[in-house]
Image (spheres, coloured by chain):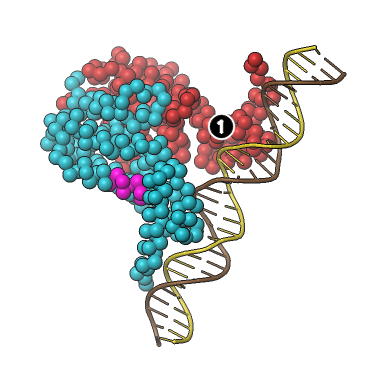
Chain colours: A red, B cyan, C yellow, D brown
Amino acid sequence: MARAIQKRTLQTRAKLVKAAQTVIDTQGYEALRVEQVVQLAGVAKGTFFAHFSDKDALMDQLIGARIDALLDDIAAQTSPQDISGMVDALMPLMNFMTCERYVFDLIIRHSGAAAREEIGPIATTFGRHGEVVSHWLEGGPFRQDLSVELLAEGVQAFSIQAISLVFCALHNEISLRDRLTLYLTAWLLPKP
Amino acid sequence: MARAIQKRTLQTRAKLVKAAQTVIDTQGYEALRVEQVVQLAGVAKGTFFAHFSDKDALMDQLIGARIDALLDDIAAQTSPQDISGMVDALMPLMNFMTCERYVFDLIIRHSGAAAREEIGPIATTFGRHGEVVSHWLEGGPFRQDLSVELLAEGVQAFSIQAISLVFCALHNEISLRDRLTLYLTAWLLPKP
DNA sequence: ACTAAAAAATGACCGCGGTCAATATTAAAT
DNA sequence: ATTTAATATTGACCGCGGTCATTTTTTAGT
């Protein structure tokens, strides 16, 4: 039968997460090295991989937690009634996703369940994001010819597109906020 | 003063590219190892990195060339006059982009100029893609309230979204083609 | 031809993510 | 308390991308 999780296990895991967060806070996500994390946590390298399947799994958890916290703030607000309000609400999330190229790449890589059997923290936040946006669209003054779920998928697609262009050498004359406003207006308020 | 490029340089580079293509043809993109490529090409490891800044640069070139060839085919056809025709035209490209998860990730990572000074082969193909789609939209029976360039950016955003969901464990009940059709209809033929 | 400088090729070496057989610790059974 | 099986930890080791001082080859000047 399945045994209970040992206290030691939780302690070690907590030490690893704390050490990782310290590294990220001081040096950023991209600079994180597993060797540095285990040294800071005072455990052997192998222990790390007994707790996380790989380095990406740790990042998935930490970045997923950050996004979740941002979504908490977003969900706590009243539903925006126009594009400008919607962009305002989404900007903290957008800013986090653009804080480092490495972070953006990792989020994209984990946004779907990434062909793994179990869905990870970041993928879960994408589901939540869709629900929050869907809820906004339900009563709002936006196009009514499509399901809110489909519209929400479009909002995600354009958010990713806007973020991508931040890292693009060609199109950086227009700000992230302005580009997202442009996209969402075209998507949610078409006037053909 | 700058000297002319040696014949030997071009030969070595060709040997590396040929060896790489052989590996890819037999084992796929993800399985490619630099060590195997240089062994097959009969050169030292250091030589590889004298010709390509890193492994990604080689992939950028090879995948970029493939996409370019697909865009040649697409551009050679007459402009599609409806969503179905547009999706038909785009499908070969979509299928290539979904042939391997590794390929998709690499394309995304290089789709913008990736914060590098010089724009790479894949990033160039994205520019071309935008031009081809813009040209389609110019005379076609699609929404006229936005610039064709902006509409083309949307087509790219939805293409990426559709591809992403192929690799997503949650949403794989609907096919890539059907999803792209759904998205492009909603984007290019809104009826609010 | 000979020589000097520029360019190309080499391979030992490093950094870092990830593995695994061996060892240590914990918790249940007697 | 002792045994036993499950679980957690360890660190030497591996694979592979990437570096760089050294050596080899090519080119241009005389």
Q: Is residue B54 left or right of residue B191?
A: right
The spot of residue B169 in percent (x, y) is: 41, 25
Residue nearest the observer in this picture, A109 or B99: B99
Quadrant where the N terminus of chain B lies?
A: bottom left
Mark 1: which secondary structure? loop
Tell whether position B66 is magenta.
yes
Residue B28 in the image, given as x and y percentages of width and height:
41, 42
Q: Is residue D21 above or below residue B84?
A: below
Q: Quadrant of residue A152?
A: top left
Regarding residue B166, the answer to whether it shows in the image is yes
| B149 sits left or right of A126 in the view | left
Q: Amino acid at mark 1?
A: Ser
Front-most of residues B153 and B125: B125
Relative horizontal placement of residue A68, taking residue B126 as reference (left or right): right
> What residue sits 26% from the left and 43% below the top?
B70
State the extent of the magenta-drawn residues as a range.
B61-68
Question: Which sits in the foreground, A9 or B191?
Answer: A9
Q: Residues within 10 Å of mark 1 (few under 14, many from 20)?
A: few
Q: Residue furthest front?
A: B26
Lateral position of residue D22 relative to residue B159, left or right: right
Q: Is residue B89 above or below residue A84?
A: below
Q: Nearer the viewer, residue B105 or B115?
A: B105
Residue beneath the point at 41% across and 53% down: B19
Which residue position holds label 1? A53
The x and y percentages for residue A138 are 31, 14
Quadrant position of the C terminus of chain B in the picture: top left
Point 24% across, 17% down: residue: A144
As for residue A1 lying within the magenta part, the answer is: no
